[in-house]
Image (cartoon, grey):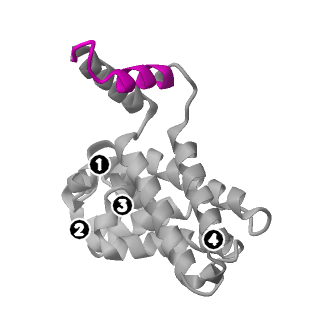
Amino acid sequence: MARPRNGPLLTRDQIVVAALDLVDHYGLDALSMRKLANRLGVDPMSIYHHVPGKDTLLRALVEHVFDSMAQPALDGDWHQRVRSWATAYRAVADEHPNLVLRIVSDPAATAVAAARISDTLYAALEASGMSPNAVVASAGVLVDFVHGYCLSLTSAARQQELRQAFQAELDKQPPNKIKALRCLHSQAAASDYDGFHFGLDVILDGLDKLNTKNPHHTKDL
């Protein structure tokens, strides 16, 4: 087993934790065996004893992050189970945006993540009476919604920055223009409006209406 310079034996877990810290701070593009070795204080070849290449390391990162995601109960109201899943997924994306929001462009990494976290979501959607096609499509809508929300608002500080920038742009416009936008944006900014949970409400209400309007939804999408 490899040993860091003047330190204890190097383990695979240490490598994964250090790699995740590197990605969290500097992004996925900054991840390389050489940079990781410098961070760990080892020769790059020492890492290869545990992780044969960058693809394997990325898989290990995805496994590490998504295995820690909280999962909803397997029974109870399906709406609440879907909400719990989406909220947990958002928490993971908020904590590790440089990984979670980038792996969507990597089919292999996406498959690793989906295999670990999707079962409880599919079970919750199936409990609504949806057909298999509808379950798969609905799960995709929910995942895309969480991704889109987190891409634009990755932290509380980021949300505040975006609100301020938008308000500054509104203030530049002539007073007699964009009246509805100016008024409603100001009112919403002064409230405790939660766009994430509002979006979930819209999706879940839409799924309920689809089931109500189309009884065959339980047979086919």
Where does label 1 land, which residue? 39
Q: Is residue 179 magenta?
A: yes
Q: Are marks 1 and 3 in contact (CB under 8 Å)?
A: no
Relative to 41, residue 180 above or below? above
Residue at the image position 26 percent from the left and 73 percent from the top: 53
x, y (%) of residue 51?
Answer: 33, 72
Boundaries of the magenta span: 173-188
x, y (%) of residue 110?
Answer: 39, 71
Cα separation, mark 4 vs mark 3, equals 64 Å
Where does label 3 land, which residue? 3
Where does label 2 land, which residue? 45
For the residue pair 1 and 99, the one nearer the viewer reads as 99
| Of labels 4 and 3, the one closer to you | 4
Cα separation, mark 2 vs mark 4, equals 61 Å
Most common secondary structure along the magenta stretch: helix
Q: Are marks 2 and 4 in contact (CB under 8 Å)?
A: no
Q: Are marks 4 and 1 in contact (CB under 8 Å)?
A: no
What's under tag 3, amino acid-wise?
A: Arg
Where does label 4 land, which residue? 213
